[in-house]
Image: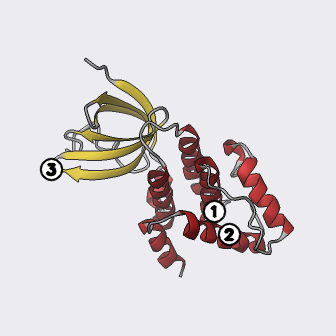
Amino acid sequence: MQDTVKETAIVLGSFPVGEYDRRVILLTKNRGKVTAFAKGARRQNSQLLAATDLFAFGEFFLYPGRNSYTLTGAKIQTYFEELRKEFKKAYYGMFFLELCDYYSRENNDEKELLRLLYQSLRALQLPSLPPGLVQYIFEIRALVIHGEYPGIPAKMQLLESTKYTLEYIAATPIEKLYTFNVSEEVFWELKKVTGDFRKKYIDRKIKSLEMISLLEE
């Protein structure tokens, strides 16, 4: 008989099942992306009600089944409540969740991706950083982690400061990624670069990104 396991994780997706249950997608430290069912999580008095919301980060207690896990408990460290208060930033956060769902796989080593997601959600809450810059940094570093980052585009004329920024994003420790700001010119070049990368490496539409585009208009 298998024992319950404890995993550090972030909720990437949460979906209603039946009358009171939820199915959640977790990005975990040691097991990659996993699906878990939380029985009774939609009941108002359930201890799993808030723990199965998007962005919830902490320790999750999982009972392994044949094809999925059962979520039996959780100790949440942060709910990233600031993102819930700001409609626009919430969509940036949901974009990060969707992209992590796209990249991650079950039983893969996704520690770096989990660290990147956690630090990026924290950075979104900082008033000193434009959410668009956090997005571009996240996208570029996610490509590095996924092994698809092609380096500085050779066919694109970029400012030297933009090239330096790209090199910094690709190589610096994740905990130091969100410690700088950029000029308006560099910002727009990063937007162009990440847009080109996205078209090349992402083969599906990201719903939250479409909403961000509408909010930016």
- Residue sitting at x 46%, y 73%: 210
Residue 10 location, quadrant = top left
Q: Residues within 10 Å of mark 3 (few under 14, many from 20)?
A: few
Q: Residues within 10 Å of mark 2 (few under 14, many from 20)?
A: some
Residue of label 1: 136
Residue of label 3: 18
Identify the image's colour scheme: rainbow, by chain, secondary structure or one colour: secondary structure
Q: Are marks 1 and 2 in contact (CB under 8 Å)?
A: yes
Mark 3–mark 2 distance (CA, rounded to whole Å):
43 Å
Helix, strand or loop under label 1: helix
Residue depth check, mark 3 versus mark 2: number of the one nearer the observer: 2
Q: Inspect the image, locate mark 1, and give the three-letter code of the amino acid beneath it.
A: Tyr
Mark 1–mark 2 distance (CA, rounded to whole Å):
9 Å
Q: Quadrant of the N terminus?
A: top left
Q: Inspect the image, locate mark 3, and give the three-letter code of the amino acid beneath it.
A: Gly
Horizontal placement of 51 versus 133: left or right?
A: left
Helix, strand or loop under label 3: loop
